[in-house]
Image: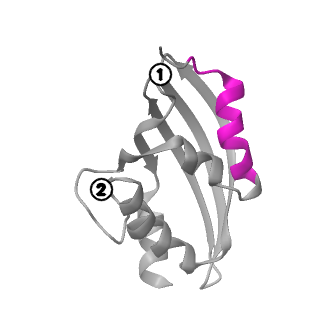
Amino acid sequence: MSTTLTLDHIHAIMDPIDQGDWSKLYEAIDENVRWWIGADEYNPDAATGVYNLQEWTEKVRNRLLPRLDGGITMKSNTMDIIGQKVIIEASGTAKQKNGRPYNNRFCWIFIFNDAGKIVEIREYMNTALVQEVMTTN
């Protein structure tokens, strides 16, 4: 039996991120997720490549967050559901350790399986900005 996605369900996962709590999103992601960011090729400075959840945590999150002062404040701007696909436009703001602003825009496409877990993420963002953060902080 397949899970029917609703905006209430997606808000329950995404709204806590606006307050800095990513736990609901992490719980919704299958550990073997195919998390694609920006390009197929792995570039550690731009954070592009294809990851599972553990790889994303180690190679993206754990490398980016220490270069920011206080983490990223996220805001989900729009959410649309098409069957088992969710499209989210979001913005993230932070201050880099070097004092420069980090203002990035994101488009996340989540694919859910029948059990309600996210099994694929396609993430589009300003990877040049991520590369700036990674190489100058």
With 12 as the anchor, is 5 left or right in this view?
Answer: left
Q: Nearer the viewer, residue 117 or 79?
A: 117
Residue located 48% across and 72% down the image: 62
Residue, far front: 1
What element does badge 1 sit on?
loop
Q: Nearer the viewer, residue 80 or 54?
A: 54
What element does badge 2 sit on?
strand
Image coordinates for residue 96, horizontal then vertical, percent: 61, 77
Q: Is 101 placed above or below 15 here?
A: below
Q: Specify the label residue 49 is tagged with.
A: 2
Q: Is 89 placed above or below 38 here?
A: above
Amino acid type of the residue tagged 2 in the rendering: Gly
Q: Which residues are magenta?
A: 4-18
Q: Nearer the viewer, mark 2 or mark 1?
A: 1
Among numbered discs 2 and 1, the one appearing first in the sequence: 2
Amino acid type of the residue tagged 1 in the rendering: Gln
In space, the residues marked 2 and 1 are separated at their CA atoms by 23 Å
